[in-house]
Structure formats: structure tokens, C-alpha cells
Amino acid sequence: MKSTIPDTGVPITPPAGNGGDRQEASLHGEILLRLRDYVVEGNIAEGARVPERQLCEMLGISRTPLREALKVLAAEGLIELLPNRGARVRQLSQRDLEELFDVMAGLESLAGRLACEAITDAEITAIEQLHYEMYGHYLHRDMHGYFQTNQRIHESIVAAARNETLKTAYANFAGRIRRVRYSANFARKRQRWAEAMREHEAILDALRRRAGSELSDILFQHLRNKRTAAIEHLTEPQEDAPASP
Amino acid sequence: MKSTIPDTGVPITPPAGNGGDRQEASLHGEILLRLRDYVVEGNIAEGARVPERQLCEMLGISRTPLREALKVLAAEGLIELLPNRGARVRQLSQRDLEELFDVMAGLESLAGRLACEAITDAEITAIEQLHYEMYGHYLHRDMHGYFQTNQRIHESIVAAARNETLKTAYANFAGRIRRVRYSANFARKRQRWAEAMREHEAILDALRRRAGSELSDILFQHLRNKRTAAIEHLTEPQEDAPASP
DNA sequence: AGGACAAAAAATGAATGCAAAATAGCCGGT
DNA sequence: ACCGGCTATTTTGCATTCATTTTTTGTCCT
């Protein structure tokens, strides 16, 4: 017996096979996006309850679409649903962070490997451009600019991998730790910063040579080092950090 | 003192920080699990509509929890939600499959790398055991047994990585292509089969030596080859394959 | 007869309502 | 006065209901 559900045929209309989907339309998707941002940006304390009713009036909707969005956010790992006790903002233990960093490292490592197969010279040039820009930020001790450019470089590599599924997954995991990235500006240590710059040069070098395995290794190690710095920073938040300008 | 600040307090109660969550309790979670299996096992044709009302009576529930589950499934990438036109089983293009295989390859590659850091001798022995078992299936031309054991080996590697987040993500992506794995038994070609066995031996070797980078490379290539075989099989489904019983 | 238009039917998306569980507030016991 | 049990209120989870949109069907016109 094949289909328990009979006629549902209509095998036609495969409209768009995007990697992981974002439903931009349909109000519910709107709610989802807004709520995700709201949580990711840290508007609710870690481990705190997500007040349904309050959010409902804040967003001007009823509980149904909100709860649907909450379910999705829970599936994404941003919040957790306690049976009969509502939603709470996911509290990331140190172990969780380590795991997330490692998965991100794995995904970027993969992205690098794939990028070597398909990246164009123009894309490499663009990344080199970003690299120099970032170097400028480094010289000027511009943490914020450095961070942003750094992120753009990594995103460029992911984009060069030509894999929407990977890109979506990457964005998902990035969202989970963004809150931490906001609160904790690791890589504040001068030494780590210099190291990171050297690693980035090695990344560019491997990319130019389209050395997939090698780039994969370098990227993993690079992210691993980032992870170590981040965890250290969270464990003992007082470093050599001076106030920003 | 009571809580001047209404809810956001209660920083206590970090019950369980599991990697990606499965809400086993709460009926809604039940529905989610059952629906996921229902879709993954291919009970609905690709691209076909997911009939809400029918599923409702089939599961004996109202539309609300069902729709919540559908939203989650859509976020997982198993189905897609067309605005005002209901849910459809996600139709995977060849490109989608390639992307998924590559991401799986990346995750397993990562798993191997991490496993080398933490795997115990006992675990390696267990995997060796599975390897010999699989070799037996290979000699007896037992495709089904081979496949199952093969999957257990890969799952063991993922488990040895000690990363619940990775494990969850891996399971998610595996679910997306399971339907294809069911319908298409690639690796039917004798030659590819023999190759796979050799690759598996290399995997074991690298694992024994805890050679992380190397294992990472081997695993990626192994999965890449699988991908090629699978895509070829899907493109021209008539190989040396005899009809199944 | 074929196609286009329109109305009916069905399905989707969201809001509201209702039972059960949890939280809090309250009272009595020691 | 403090702790434990009991009741009231809030909150959650699901069902039901309502408004739109889509899809289908029937009819009419060319």
C-alpha cells in the first residue's frame, strides 16, 4: 500500500528549493523573524520566562501565531519549552558554548573546503580587500570595525561554498551564540588578536592556492582558538581590557 | 521580598541543557515526533500537500497542535509552508541533495576530528567490532545488513565526538535525506562497495592513531564518494540492480 | 465546444474560549 | 514567628470559532 492519503497528488509545482527556508511573508513568518531578533538581541534575560501575553500585546497579535513562533524558536535552540511551564530563554552552559563553537568551526571548516572548489578569483580578491580593511582596523585598535569585517570575511567564505543549506545552518548556529558574542568581546587580548591576524593570512593563502584540506584544517584551528579565547573570557571576564574610545 | 520585577527573575532552575532538544512530553511533542516519522518514512508523496484535516482525525487532535508541529517541521526543512496554500512535503532537487550530502560530510568530518580527541579504546574496539560485522555483510553480499551496520558505525563516530549539538544537527540532516536513502539504495555498484570498504579501513586506522585532521579528510572524501554514487544512481536509476522482493 | 467568469465549497490563518496545571497568596498548626 | 497545607489567580495547552483566501465547480458567452 502506497499512499494512505489518497489523491494528494499534484506532483507538480516545486517552486523553490531553498536551503533552509525563511518564510518572509505570511504574518506568522513576520512574527517569527521579529521574535527571533528580539530574543537574539538579548531583550530577555537568560533563563527568564518568555511572557506570552505581554509579547502578544507588544506585537499586537493573539497567542496562536506567537506560540507557533515559540515552537519554531525552540526547535532552533534559542529557547526551551518546559511542559506546562512555558518558554524560557535558553541558558547556555559553558559546555553548550563549547559545543556550539565546535560545530561552527566544523561548518566553517567545511565551507572553506567547499569554497576552494568553486571560488572565483574575483571573490578571492574581495576577501583580500576585506582582509586589508580588517588589518587597518587591527592597526587602529578598532575592535568594533575589526569584528564586523572579520565576520564579513567568514560570511564570504561561507557564501563562496555555494551551499545554501550550509549557509542556513551556519546562520542558525551563529544566531544561537550571537547573544554571547554581543556581551563578551573576547579576542581582547592583544596576543590573541595578533595570532588571529596571522591565522587569517594563512587562511587567505590556502584559499588562493585552493588547498581545500589545508584550509579546512586552518579554519578549524582558527575557530578552535577563538573558542578557547571566548571561554576563557567568560570564565574570567577581567582581562587587559581598556575602555573603548 | 517579592519580585518587584515581575518575571525575568528566577535565574535558577537550569534543568537540562541538552544539545538541541526533543520535547518528548507534552502531547505536542508527541505529535511532532509522530508527524516527523510519518513524513520521513515517506507516507506522503514528495511535493504533495499535507492534509491538515485528515491528519487531525488520524491523530485525534485539533488543528492547533498539528499546525504547531508543521511549523517546526518546516523549520527543520522537511516540509515547506506556502502562504495560504498549506504545507507540502519538501521536494529535494538534485542540487538540494548534493548540498545535504556535503553538509553531512562536513558534520561527519567534524565528528571524526572531535572523536579523535575524546574517544576511548573501548569505543574504538566497539567500532572495530562493527567494522568486522560489516565486512561479513559485505562478503555475504547482504546489502541491508551492510547498510545498517555502516550507519551504526557512522553514528558511533558521531557519538564519540561528545557533542550533543552536533549529534542533534546530524540527526536532523540525516532525517532530511532518509527518504532518499530508503528509495534509492545506491552503493549497489560492486566497485563502489569495495572502495567503501577500503575507505572504512582507512577511517579505522586514522581513528586508532587519533589522527584528527587525517580522519577528517578521509571522512569527508568518503562521504563525498557516497554522494557521487547516490547522485549517479538517482540520475540513472537502472544499474546492475535486480528488483527487490 | 472551449474558455472565461462567477459563485460555492473547502481550506488556511488567526482569534477566542475553555479545561487543566502551575504559581501565588492565605490561613492554620506547632 | 515559622512552616506546611489549602484555596484563588494566573498561565498554559488545546479546542473551537471566525474571517480570508484559494480551489473547485457550474454556467454563460464567444
Image: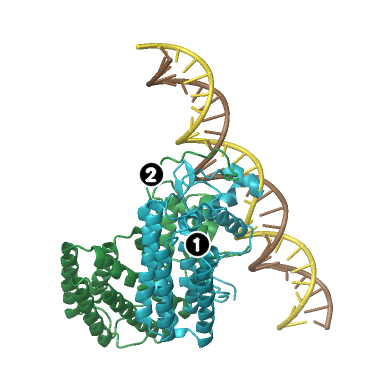
Chain colours: A green, B cyan, C brown, D yellow
Q: Which quadrant holds the C terminus of chain A?
A: bottom left
Residue at the spot of label 2 = A15
Q: Is residue B18 visible?
A: no
State the residue in front, A163 or D26. Answer: A163
Residues tagged 1 and 2 counted as in contact (Cβ below 8 A): no
Residue A93, image x, y percentages: 48, 78
The amino acid on which the numbered mark 1 sits, given as a three-letter code, is Ala
In this rendering, the label closer to the viewer, 1 or 2: 2
Side (left or right) of B6 relative to A124:
right
Side (left or right) of C27 relative to A108:
right
Q: Chain of mark 1?
A: A
Tell me if residue B217 comes above or below residue B187 in the rendering. below
Residue A91, image x, y percentages: 49, 73
Q: Chain of mark 2?
A: A
Quarter-of-image position of residue A213: bottom left
Residue at the spot of label 1 = A75
Tell me if residue B188 comes above or below residue A191 in the rendering. above
Which of the labelled discs sits on residue B122, or is there none? Answer: none
Secondary structure category for the residue under label 2: loop
CA–CA distance between discs 1 and 2?
25 Å
Residue A244, image x, y percentages: 26, 79
Residue in view at x 23 percent, y 84 percent: A194
Residue in view at x 23 percent, y 70 percent: A149
